[in-house]
Image: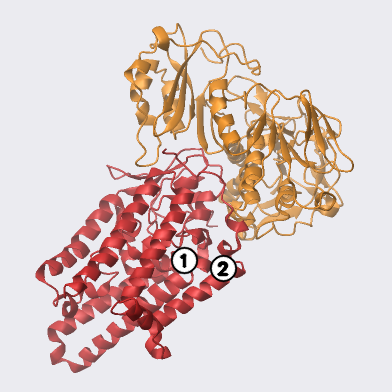
Chain colours: A red, B orange
Amino acid sequence: MDQQGQNGLMKTYRQGYRSRGAMGYVAAIGLLAFYLILYFQDKLGVTWFDDIAAAMGLENRWYLYGFLYCVGMVFGGAYYLRHHGNSRYNRIRIAVNITVQVLLGFSLPFVMHLFGERDFYFSYIWPLKIEYLYPSDISQFPIYIIAYSALASLLAMPVLAYFFGKRWYCSWVCGCGGLANTFGDPWRHLTSTSTRSWKFEQVSVHSVMFLAVLTTAAVGLDFAIGNQYPTFHAFAGELRSWYGLVVGAILAGVVGVGFYPLFGPRVWCRNFCPMAAMLGLIQKLGRYRIRVKDDMCISCGNCTTYCEMGIDVRSYAQQNQSFTRASCVGCGMCAHVCPRGVLKLENTWSLNRDKHRQGLNVLDV
Amino acid sequence: MNIVIIGNGVAGVEAALTVRKREPDWNVTIISEESDHFFSRTALMWVVCGQMKHEDIEPYERDLYARLRFQRVRARAVGVDVTNKQVALSGEAAISYDRLLIACGSRPRPGPWPGSDLPGIGHFVTLQDLEWLEAELHGGPSVSRPPRPEEHLPRSSDDSPYRVRKTVLGERGGSAQAPAVVGGGLIGIEAVEVMVAAGLRPKFFIREEWFWPMAIEPREAKWITDRMASHGVEVLLEHDLKEFQGNGRVERIVTNQGEYPADLAVVAIGVVPNTSWLAQSSIELDARGGIVVDDQLTTSDPSVFAAGDCAAVGWFDGSRRPQQLWYTSRDQGRVAGRRLLGDTAEYRRGLWYNSAKLMDIEYTTAGLVNMNVEGEHNWFFEEQGRVRSTTRIVTRGAGTDKDPVIGFNLLGRRWDHAVLLQWIEERRALRWVLKNLRRASFDTEFVPPLSIPSSALAATEGANALEGPAPNPYIKGPTAYPYS
């Protein structure tokens, strides 16, 4: 049956592992340790994950990680569907996301590898997977993959975001978003909704986006003329490996997932992901919005509490203000938990002028 | 200018915000016995079960009062002296005002039955009720409490709705195991839901023949009652309470149909204006305790205004009584704010509308659906496919599909009440409304739209003939329509 809205009350804050209780800290420490060892095993002088992968007949630890990732997504998806699967939007969205990740994010690269090809993750595009526009990297792939990467990153990404908002990627396709909405769903209410956290997000996420563009440009320029300028060549190499370490490993991996049980599942997406920042800017100019029904909000705060991106949805709803926020990934949970059916995700056919494009502050006096 | 506001609820805070927007330098003082922070009273149920924590139901960040320089006084107001323009406080010096807003809200209607004051019996309206119920059901709050919960204790009194109730955890030997709710309305079903969420099987005592007769009719109520039963609720209809019994705490509930064990009872039989403290002042109250105000929310004293649940405001049908709704209180607060600023501003509510969620069933209503007046007809459709819903459209006239629509009562789907209200004002005929109903849909994406078979659309003949008014002995509303 298709129901709208949440089915039954949630006991979120009465479950210790979901409310920063002792089990929450244990889970966070476990996840942090897992990702630290995964990314930095060489520096730590251990080979545990490679050993397990070898025992399972996998070539290296990254295939093992892909396998564990899929397991986490499937079990997390079951958790998500058990709690929110009464809504058709939630069912379709999470099914598509899991399918995309299990097929394109794990199985296909694995099969490509078996056939002796370089593995390519079709579900990741620049600037999230920044290497996919590095000329030095992408040029080693067959021409159809080069074309796919360029078209997906430079054409499909902005066009789809204009018409459907950033949710087409962040909530339907992306691997980071997929893990956040399945395995990470028990902790979605832990994202901070304070104004301070919003200010931090605005600065940090756009800084990383700027860095991503700068790094891509430097690496591209280096590919073209680097052999004539050894200083620049060294700088570009430095920048590239620094970006890979800080953004790719520490922020996306260790911080992004390790802090799920303490700061919510979208720490990476909200504060650091260059792709999310870029999609967000397009979304603000585009046709996606959250529509607010007039004068029906009771300010209960379920929407704000369960927003995984820390948007104070209530501040708009109680002012009758339909809105588009750059950070909104369109997971639909605000509308799902609203007890009065006040909110609705939609792509409008015409650009609506009444759509509020700024944040609402209580009073600036 | 000294503005004093009694009440830290939605009407009071909206009024304070309205004043501050225009007058950065005026003194604004907010007096509250209940809470340091403005919170959403409609959201208490989600805090009890643990879906939200205390901070989550506060619509503004906690620095609001400091940032906007609202002075807060945590005290109980005990009287207003309009001659000297002072508000008397319990145990503290009186506060002087130039303009005063009374927005002190409602208090739960106490049970009229013997034993209603036994420990283990309470209400579900105030922040202190919330803390009491959290303790009785779960042993305490989930992860946070409102700040300074003990602050108001010395200033409270035994008859205050904000007093902290003693729990009977010790006498009972733990949290409640056999809870009961008395009163088949919205607060009643909320209390039932939090008990279900706590893993209990509550008894739900309802005096009437069906649940919530003020708003819904028997066919609609049956679906909700069945849903409650499927969650383990024992719904006891037509049970008139006689007495609460017990030795030092509630142990049994006696009704006209028998005796039932209960170790916790929430009495939810409505709210009344919280105005008994004004009895000695010269501010005029109506027979039901509502503060008499004109359309500009002015009380009998020209520098005192009233808004929210305590004010007897004008209704669409011409009567004057409190309107105990969140969004009407918010609107009244905004009008009262302009009155405090010295503006001319009127509070007028248009047609009735409301929404609710009953267990997991969404409910929207617009216009007049329960007038029970001769000449009223019901078009009713029950959808039983992938989506379950009921659609009841009320018309007025000869009983054909050319009659104008005057009300909608809708369960199971989401609707934009603004569109429905517009159709009522435009006097759209039933035939036109049925054809265009999808335009008022507010369903979530991918939900299959409501599709009405053509047999049900031909609404005036044979088996689909429009029905007369549903017999509803509980509605004592006007006997004629307020508009022609």
Q: The numbered mark 2 sits on a residue in which chain?
A: A
Indicate whether A334 appears above or below A130. Answer: above
Quarter that holds the C terminus of chain A = bottom right
The answer to whether residue B163 of the structure is visible from this angle is: yes
Q: Which residue is mark 1?
A: A199
In this rendering, position of residue B443 left or right of residue A220: right
In this rendering, position of residue A54 left or right of residue B185: left
Residue B225: give x, y in percent of width and height: 59, 30
Indicate whether A26 appears above or below B217. Answer: below
Between marks 2 and 1 in the image, the one whose residue lies nearer the viewer: 2
Q: CA distance from mark 2 to mark 1?
A: 26 Å
Label 1 element class: helix
Sequence order check, earlier mark of 2 and 1: 2
Q: Which mark is residue A365?
A: none
Place residue B297 in its image quadrant: top right
The answer to whether residue A355 of the structure is visible from this angle is: no
In this rendering, position of residue B133 left or right of residue A276: right
Cβ atoms at labels 2 and 1 below 8 Å apart: no
Label 2 element class: helix
Residue A155: give x, y in percent of width and height: 19, 60
